[in-house]
């Protein structure tokens, strides 16, 4: 029987764990405000300038769209400072070799690509009333990166609060690896298609439920509208994949994921029935972010285990 080498684990300050979750929560707010920018058509509020706003560092006599877009850029700037601070603190407080360091570094890299993709949206004119096919692609890529960024931040915070699971020693159940990766991949597809559906609802609001359904399958409808049905279809597939993981794990966190997934379906149905007003879109996105964070943590437990499973495995090996 293999033995587990003794390993010194630095005690993670509770303040760092709390700070990490604050960074996660703040970035959820940034994502929600980004949805407000899209829903209000304010993406071109700062013109085709980036990172300046209409050529100025601080806009003068701005219109409402400019205020909304500038607020989002300012929030993103604060996010950058918070994430960099998190990474510096992690490297100071956590021993070399911990997975939490890799998750923190991934957060920074994905933050950089997030900024570059945001700049590409503005400089490429993929904002406002633009309905080009290239915007659909950019929207999907941007939101996928946003999910990965939020996932990396969540993993950093989760592993900081579970130091034993952040070591490089894998303690996850190999039989859970496939369900975990499939659930994550399927949920990313759901998120990307959801961002496209939300964009379609913003640019082509449906006057009624029946007319909206008819437009989804009309050959004369814009591509964005004809792609709306992909999101609910992907959500059903994602449901099956996540339930597969939850049923195999049967953990408390798994039931939380299941509950949040059920809430997402309720909010999604409400979004359709209410003809996608801005407020329900924001609430739906908030639910999606909470669900994604919980799913990432659940998948991390499946793939790499937790402090509890590590301690149990160590005790069993000692008895051997």
Image (cartoon, rainbow, N blue to C red):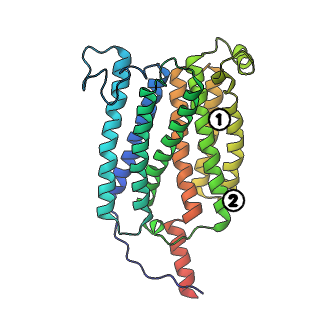
Q: Identify the residue shown where x is 58% and y is 38%.
A: 191
**Residue 248 marker:** 2
Q: Secondary structure at mark 1?
A: helix
| Residue situated in front as seen by the camera: 116 or 32 | 116
Give residue 237's quadrant in the image. top right
Residue 233 visible in the picture: yes
Residue contact between numbered discs 2 and 1, judged by CB atoms under 8 Å: no
Residue 161 visible in the picture: no
Q: Quadrant of the C terminus?
A: bottom right
Q: Identify the residue shown where x is 64% and y is 15%.
A: 206
Residue 57 placed where, x, y %? 24, 26
Q: Quadrant of the N terminus?
A: bottom right
Q: Identify the residue shown where x is 37% and y is 24%.
A: 69
Residue 218 placed where, x, y %? 75, 17
Cα separation, mark 2 vs mark 1, equals 22 Å
**Relative to residue 215, is residue 312 depicted above or below?**
below
Circle 2 residues within 10 Å: few <14, some 14–19, many ≥20: some
The residue beneath circle 1 is: 265
Circle 1 residues within 10 Å: few <14, some 14–19, many ≥20: some
- If you read the primary sequence from the N terminus, does the residue marked by circle 2 or circle 1 appear first? 2
Residue 295 placed where, x, y %? 57, 50
In the displayed structure, does residue 25 sit left or right of residue 134?
Answer: left
Q: Secondary structure at mark 2?
A: helix
């Amino acid at each position: 029987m293999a033995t587990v080498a003794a390993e010194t684990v630095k005690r993670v300050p509770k303040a760092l764990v709390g700070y990490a979750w604050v960074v996660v929560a703040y970035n959820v707010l940034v994502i929600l405000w980004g949805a407000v920018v899209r829903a209000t058509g304010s993406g071109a509020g700062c013109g085709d300038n980036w990172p300046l706003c209409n050529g100025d560092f601080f806009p003068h006599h701005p219109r409402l769209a400019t205020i909304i877009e500038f607020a989002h850029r300012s929030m993103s700037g604060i996010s950058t400072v918070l994430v960099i601070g998190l990474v510096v603190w992690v490297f100071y407080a956590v021993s070399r070799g911990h997975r939490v360091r890799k998750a923190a570094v991934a957060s920074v890299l994905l933050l950089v690509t997030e900024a570059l993709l945001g700049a590409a949206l503005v400089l490429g004119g993929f904002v406002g009333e633009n309905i080009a096919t290239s915007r659909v692609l950019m929207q999907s890529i941007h939101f996928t990166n946003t999910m990965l960024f939020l996932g990396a931040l969540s993993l950093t915070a989760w592993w900081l609060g579970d130091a034993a699971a952040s070591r490089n020693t894998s303690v996850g159940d190999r039989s859970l690896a496939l369900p975990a990766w499939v659930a994550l991949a399927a949920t990313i597809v759901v998120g990307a298609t959801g961002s496209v559906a939300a964009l379609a609802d913003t640019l082509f609001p449906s006057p009624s439920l029946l007319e909206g359904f008819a437009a989804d399958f009309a050959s004369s409808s814009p591509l964005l509208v004809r792609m709306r049905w992909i999101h609910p279809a992907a959500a059903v597939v994602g449901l099956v994949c996540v339930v597969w993981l939850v049923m195999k794990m049967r953990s408390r966190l798994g039931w939380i994921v299941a509950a949040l997934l059920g809430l997402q379906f309720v909010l999604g149905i409400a979004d359709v029935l209410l003809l996608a007003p801005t407020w329900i879109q924001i609430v739906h996105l908030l639910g999606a972010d909470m669900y994604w964070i919980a799913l990432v943590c659940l998948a991390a437990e499946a793939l790499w285990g937790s402090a509890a499973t590590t301690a149990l495995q160590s005790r069993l090996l000692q008895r051997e």
